[in-house]
Image (cartoon, rainbow, N blue to C red):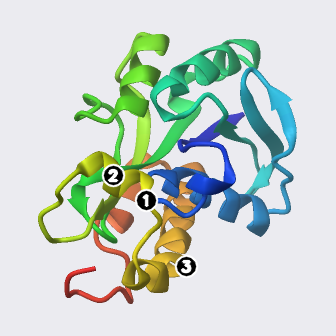
């Protein structure tokens, strides 16, 4: 079984912040494949179903971003998820808005949610789908930007970007990580190339 974990913060006030793109991509997959993310398990909300003939668990850790590993570590252990079947989807301030980057291993690159996951699982060989959120202009405070509602231009392009992220996850599941990297490591099509 694949485990696709979107990282984010629970609660209505965070729903449309850049830091919750991981949740939004997982929710898009859930709606596409009619999977209900409603069951509580290991400090996460989960739903199980099929994506292109593969059994998949979708998960949203409810621990808040910086403690994401506290939810994922027991989920992986309890459901005996092989690490090459674990995928973590999250926002990345180091990448420009609308850019997607799949990696099969590497450091957390300063992302606290991913740091927590790597620390708890004891390995950095985890497939991750990184969703670029940098708006293309200097930020007074990265933290404020992450936790504030998205700007109008970003909201306008959000749907296409989330679709692109969901397509990338489906591709990893159906075709493997190498093929997915070749197809999806780029800017989402249809997004404005000017500053977000």
Q: Which residue is mark 2?
A: 144
Q: Residue 116 falls in which quadrant of the image?
A: top left
- Residue 130 visible to an observer of this rendering: no
Q: Seen in the image, is 84 located left or right of residue 118?
A: right
Using the image as rendered, state which of residue 118 and residue 19 is in the foreground. Answer: 19
Query: Residue 134: x and y, percent?
Result: 25, 63
Q: Seen in the image, is 162 located left or right of residue 55?
A: left
The residue lying at 59 percent from left, 50 percent from top is 173
Work out whether 67 lies above or below 37.
above
Query: Residue 70: x and y, percent?
Result: 58, 17
Work out whether 58 lies above or below 69.
below
Q: Check contact, mark 1 vs mark 2: CB within 8 A.
A: yes
Q: Which residue is mark 1?
A: 148
Work out whether 20 lies above or below 2.
below
The N terminus - image quarter: top right
Give how far apart the Cα atoms at labels 2 and 3 are: 23 Å
Number of numbered discs on residues? 3
The residue lying at 26 percent from left, 30 percent from top is 106
Q: Which residue is mark 3?
A: 159
- Residue 86 visible to an observer of this rendering: yes
Q: Residue 47 falls in which quadrant of the image?
A: top right
Q: Which mark is residue 194?
A: none
Q: For the residue labelled by badge 2, is the local secondary structure a helix, a strand or a loop?
A: helix
Give how far apart the Cα atoms at labels 1 and 3 are: 18 Å
Categorize mark 2 by other alpha carbons within 10 Å: few (<14), some (14-19), many (20+): few
Categorize mark 1 by other alpha carbons within 10 Å: few (<14), some (14-19), many (20+): some
């Amino acid at each position: 079984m694949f485990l696709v974990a979107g990282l984010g913060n629970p609660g209505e006030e965070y729903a449309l912040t850049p830091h919750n793109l991981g949740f939004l991509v997982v929710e898009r997959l859930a709606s596409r494949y009619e999977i209900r993310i409603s069951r509580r398990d290991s400090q996460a909300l989960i739903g199980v179903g099929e994506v292109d003939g593969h059994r998949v668990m979708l998960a949203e850790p409810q621990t808040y971003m910086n403690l994401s590993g506290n939810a994922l570590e027991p989920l992986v252990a309890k459901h005996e998820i092989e690490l090459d079947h674990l995928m973590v989807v999250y926002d990345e301030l180091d990448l420009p808005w609308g850019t997607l980057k799949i990696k099969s291993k590497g450091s957390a690159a300063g992302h606290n949610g991913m740091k927590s996951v790597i620390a708890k699982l004891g390995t950095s060989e985890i497939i991750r789908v990184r969703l670029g959120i940098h708006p293309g202009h200097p930020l007074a405070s990265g933290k404020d930007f992450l936790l504030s509602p998205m700007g109008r231009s970003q909201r306008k392009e959000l749907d296409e970007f989330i679709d692109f992220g969901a397509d990338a996850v489906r591709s990893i599941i159906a075709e493997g990580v190498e093929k997915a990297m070749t197809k999806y490591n780029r800017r989402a099509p249809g997004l404005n190339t000017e500053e977000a």
